[in-house]
């Protein structure tokens, strides 16, 4: 072999080793990031709230037994493995990790887990939904939890994994607090300071024990490179846009999509979260004008989703008009019931239904906010089309924290604007719960949902979901408007953040 060839090979190997060394080097620890949120959260107790903002912040403080990986498959978090399931599908035995410490220095025990799940059954909307299926939760030994159901209930583990209305694990003594006055969890970051309307300051929890394995969605390794995360409420969307353009924040959540070009030319860079979710109008089926099914059908006929989505998201790059609860390509996609969904509405049909309902001009009250600017624009277009059909409409624009509180009182509203990410398990959709604001309860719903939730065959579940979607369209507890992509912004110096519906900042780090 010639000297030149030997030198070339040696140089190539040396460069390769340097490249591998660089690729494998751990990011430097340290730094503080400021994350602009849409407002002040109504609570830091994720059991009692379904708000995405609450889940986004508190998932850094609290953890659940299971979580979702990058493919939305269930993986252990505080559990040490997937559960052992009885042959009849009614008994789950969940093994617990033995290396977990709370942020107050106490080790996590089965007693803490048991007390936390019992609190979840009482105070969380999804916990109360699940409690109807639970015969008993117990701790057969110091390192496991047993859940006995009265029937097979396939969504159980998904419900134990979600970060809002969440089955978080906390010290046993803390479970007796409602509302919470202490916020001690097992997460990688702990609450240091909460100054309402200014910031929520989280600092690295030195005693944190990460799950094993590579980072994988919300699962796997949760590394604590950052010293501190500050969540800053910025209710005005234009202020968030200007903050992203000027580089004031390291991450900016929920930006108006019409700001995309401005963000592209600013200091922070745009992040498009594709197939993010779907905006909805939730109906108050318990009390008031919308408790009349004919009124809800008139609303359904009157609305024009094409104009609502265009007003909210502008460019077709950011939305599609589709009545199915899940987008095309999803295993849950079905057109069942969507013949009632008309892109430009049907004013004449709405007027006919109002006449059948003997509508007397009572105002229909729509709650919305401007923290999510697209909520406000949707409400404005809905108001115009409802008035064209003959409704009297009152648009009630509130701070997001006030709205999430007021929507729990059925006397205060008839519809409110909301949205949801496309959740991996349909039972996680809020309307599936009898107890979430909207309070959809009917024999038709219960029959369809019962069949869907008790079926263990995945292919049969897909077919049964079509019946649930059909029941939604027939009872109209909500109006699904369309599908949308979300826009956020991120500093070029902030690395390790994966686009996700609830952004998380473990594994994130700052570069120079």
Image (cartoon, grey):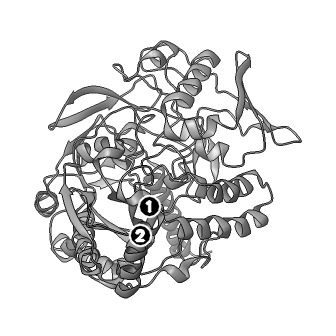
Element under disc 2: loop
Place residue 201 in its image quadrant: top left
Mark toward the viewer: 2 or 1: 2
Position in image of residue 182 (x %, y %): 35, 19
- Residue at 77 percent across and 36 percent down: it is 150
Q: Quadrant of the N terminus?
A: bottom right
Mark identifier at residue 381: none
**Gap between marks 2 and 1 measured at Cα:** 8 Å
Using a 10 Å C-alpha cutoff, classify the residue at mark 1 as few (fewer than 14 neighbours), some (14 to 19) or many (20 or more).
some
User: Residue 82, percent across and down?
Assistant: 72, 40
Is 454 on the left-hand or right-hand side of 423?
right
In this rendering, is residue 329 above or below 376? below
Where does the image place residue 430, in percent across and percent down from the top left? 49, 52
298 or 260: which is nearer to us?
Answer: 298
Q: Is residue 112 visible?
A: yes
Q: Is residue 364 above or below residue 318?
A: above
Of 291 and 106, which appears nearest the observer? 291
CB under 8 Å between discs 2 and 1: yes
Residue found at x 40% / y 32%: 61
**Residue at label 1?**
292
Determine the residue located farthest toward the right in the rendered image: 87
Residue 256 image point, x, y percent: 22, 67
Q: How many marks?
A: 2
Q: Quick one: label 2 or label 1, which is nearer the N terminus? A: 1
């Amino acid at each position: 072999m010639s000297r030149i060839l030997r030198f070339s090979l040696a140089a190539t190997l040396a460069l390769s080793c340097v490249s591998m060394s660089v690729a494998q080097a751990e990011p430097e620890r340290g730094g503080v990031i400021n994350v602009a949120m849409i407002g002040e959260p109504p609570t830091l107790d994720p059991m009692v709230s379904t708000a995405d903002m609450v889940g986004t912040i508190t998932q850094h403080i609290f953890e659940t037994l299971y979580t979702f990986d990058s493919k939305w498959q269930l993986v252990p978090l505080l559990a040490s493995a997937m559960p052992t399931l009885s042959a009849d599908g009614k008994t789950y035995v969940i093994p617990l990790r033995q290396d977990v410490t709370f942020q107050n220095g106490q080790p996590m025990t089965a007693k803490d887990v048991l007390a936390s799940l019992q609190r979840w059954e009482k105070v969380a909307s999804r916990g109360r939904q699940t409690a109807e299926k639970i015969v008993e939760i117990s701790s057969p030994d110091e390192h496991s939890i047993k859940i006995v159901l009265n029937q097979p209930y396939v969504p159980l583990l998904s419900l134990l994994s979600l970060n809002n209305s969440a089955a978080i694990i906390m010290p046993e003594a803390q479970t007796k607090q409602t509302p919470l006055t202490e916020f001690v969890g097992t997460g990688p970051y702990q609450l240091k300071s909460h100054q309402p309307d200014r910031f929520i300051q989280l600092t690295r929890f030195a005693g944190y024990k990460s799950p094993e394995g590579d980072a994988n969605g919300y699962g796997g390794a949760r590394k604590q490179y950052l010293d501190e995360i500050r969540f800053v409420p910025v209710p005005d969307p234009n202020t968030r846009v200007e903050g992203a353009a000027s580089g004031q924040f390291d991450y900016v959540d929920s930006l108006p999509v019409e700001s995309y070009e401005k963000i592209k030319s600013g200091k922070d860079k745009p992040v498009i979260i594709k197939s993010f979710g779907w905006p909805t109008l939730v109906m108050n089926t318990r009390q008031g004008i919308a408790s009349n099914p004919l009124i809800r059908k008139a609303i359904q006929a009157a609305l024009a989703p094409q104009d609502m989505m265009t007003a909210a998201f502008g460019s077709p790059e950011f939305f599609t008009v589709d009545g199915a609860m899940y987008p095309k390509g999803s295993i849950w996609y079905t057109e069942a019931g969507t013949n009632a969904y008309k892109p430009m509405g049907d004013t004449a049909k709405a007027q006919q239904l109002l006449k059948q309902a003997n509508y007397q001009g009572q105002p229909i009250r729509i709650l919305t906010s401007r923290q999510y600017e697209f909520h406000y624009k949707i409400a404005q277009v809905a108001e115009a089309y409802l008035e064209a059909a003959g409704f009297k409409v009152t648009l009630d624009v509130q701070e997001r924290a006030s709205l999430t509180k007021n929507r729990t009182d059925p006397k205060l509203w008839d519809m409110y604007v909301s949205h949801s990410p496309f959740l991996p398990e349909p039972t996680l959709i809020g309307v599936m719960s009898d107890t979430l604001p909207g309070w959809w309860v009917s024999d038709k719903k219960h029959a369809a949902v019962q069949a869907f939730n008790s079926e263990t065959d995945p292919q049969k579940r897909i077919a049964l979901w079509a019946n649930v979607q059909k029941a939604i369209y027939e009872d109209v507890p909500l109006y699904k408007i369309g599908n949308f992509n979300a826009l956020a912004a991120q500093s070029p110096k902030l690395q390790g953040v994966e686009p996700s519906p609830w952004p998380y900042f473990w594994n994130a780090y700052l570069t120079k």
